[in-house]
Image (cartoon, rainbow, N blue to C red):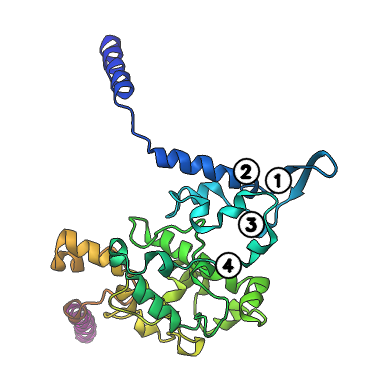
């Protein structure tokens, strides 16, 4: 492009940006400004305050459980929330009143239940599944949605266009964060943590399975109306048969690849989505006719070799 034309186009572009700036919601500004009052302490490992008793600034280490990543929060599902939407406004006072430690924590259903705006996510059905799982409050007294889905960093993962590997890594980290942490596991269950690797010693290529499929593929009961099942079954009922995944009717098509398959069918149609499906599982892409053709080709090849050998022996003798 000639320098003069570049200057003209560049000037026009800047003029458009100046006259029509990207609108910024006032609520977004207020939200970040207000939340910064909390994040200035809870967004870092060290916080400071003025101590009236000794009349000087004091620095303290923040409890690691109360340190929040602001980048995770503002890239998460609840990024537009004020801290006081979920927490008592009494937290605006410092030092925080001691009785706030007894503040009840909201669950997903408290906000999203019975709301038509969120009907497609089926929170009521998820709640039913959760209450019937081994993670239910009947089984583990203080277990709630937030034990797996931290409200300060939770992101909607399965309905995005992310690579399957990213979805697997994100979801499995949720399970590993508790099941590989003996203190966290003991706090929730009252039991000593189990050796995850030893428990799965029957599983071949553990590392490959942990990086390619989610824990919930084998440890939950599939539900046709939910993209992500929440009914976690006892370990004795976990899927252990290879053929349940590595077969034509692979379990993974109704769990891990479910959303991808639905989206693909909407874009390409049922037939094309089935043929052009990007997901690949060893043993799951088998086709009866291709199998038959491969057997016939193999048989003819073997027959040809035998005939060739017989003819060579016959003509050699003669």
Q: Earlier in the sequence, mark 1 or mark 3?
A: 1
Residue 99 in the image: above or below residue 96 = below
Write down the region rendered in magenta: 293-318
Q: Earlier in the sequence, mark 4 or mark 1?
A: 1
Check the picture and name the quadrant holding the C terminus: bottom left
Q: Residues within 10 Å of mark 2 (few under 14, many from 20)?
A: few
Separation of marks 1 and 2 at Cα, in angstroms: 8 Å
Q: Residues within 10 Å of mark 3 (few under 14, many from 20)?
A: few
Q: Earlier in the sequence, mark 1 or mark 2?
A: 2
Marks 3, 4: nearer the viewer: 3
Are the residues flagged by discs 1 and 3 in contact, CB closer than 8 Å?
A: no
Q: Going by the image, does 147 lie left or right of 17?
A: right
Q: Position of residue 218 (x, y in %)?
A: 43, 80
> Within the image, what quadrant is residue 116 found in?
bottom left
The residue lying at 30 percent from left, 75 percent from top is 254
Residue position marked by numbered label 3 in the rendering:
66
Separation of marks 4 and 2 at Cα, in angstroms: 26 Å
The residue lying at 25 percent from left, 67 percent from top is 261
Element under label 1?
Answer: strand
Question: Any mark on residue 47, and which?
Answer: 1
Marks 4, 2: nearer the viewer: 2
Q: Earlier in the sequence, mark 3 or mark 4?
A: 3
Separation of marks 3 and 4 at Cα, in angstroms: 16 Å
| 179 within the magenta span | no
Element under label 4?
Answer: helix
Question: Any mark on residue 40, and which?
Answer: 2
Element under label 3?
Answer: helix
Question: Any mark on residue 177, and which?
Answer: 4
The residue lying at 60 percent from left, 54 percent from top is 90
Are the residues flagged by discs 1 and 2 in contact, CB closer than 8 Å?
A: yes
Element under label 2?
Answer: helix
Q: Is residue 135 visible?
A: yes
């Amino acid at each position: 492009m000639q320098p003069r034309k570049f200057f003209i186009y560049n000037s026009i572009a800047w003029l458009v940006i100046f006259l029509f700036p990207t609108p910024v919601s006032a609520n977004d500004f207020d939200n970040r400004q207000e939340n910064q009052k909390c994040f200035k302490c809870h967004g870092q490992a060290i916080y400071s305050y003025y101590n009236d008793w000794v009349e000087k600034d004091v620095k303290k280490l923040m409890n690691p459980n109360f340190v929040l990543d602001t980048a995770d929060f503002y890239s998460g599902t609840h990024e537009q929330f004020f801290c006081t939407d979920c927490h008592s406004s009494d937290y605006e006072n410092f030092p925080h009143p001691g009785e706030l430690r007894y503040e009840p924590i909201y669950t997903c259903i408290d906000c999203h239940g019975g709301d038509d705006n969120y009907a497609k996510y089926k929170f009521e059905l998820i709640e039913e599944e959760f209450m019937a799982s081994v993670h239910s409050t009947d089984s583990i007294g203080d277990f709630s949605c937030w034990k797996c889905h931290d409200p300060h960093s939770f992101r909607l993962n399965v309905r995005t266009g992310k690579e399957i590997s990213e979805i697997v890594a994100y979801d499995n980290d949720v399970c590993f964060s508790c099941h590989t942490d003996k203190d966290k596991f003991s706090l929730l269950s009252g039991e000593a943590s189990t050796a995850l690797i030893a428990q799965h010693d029957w599983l071949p290529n553990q590392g490959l399975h942990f990086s390619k499929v989610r824990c919930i593929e084998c440890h939950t009961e599939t539900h046709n109306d939910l993209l992500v099942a929440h009914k976690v079954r006892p370990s004795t009922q976990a899927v252990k048969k290879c053929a349940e995944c590595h077969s034509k009717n692979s379990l993974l098509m109704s769990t891990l690849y479910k959303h991808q398959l639905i989206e693909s069918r909407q874009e390409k149609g049922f037939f094309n989505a089935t043929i052009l499906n990007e997901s690949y599982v060893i043993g799951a892409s088998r086709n009866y006719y291709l199998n038959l053709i491969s057997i016939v080709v193999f048989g003819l090849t073997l027959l040809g070799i035998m005939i060739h050998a017989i003819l060579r022996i016959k003509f050699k003798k003669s």
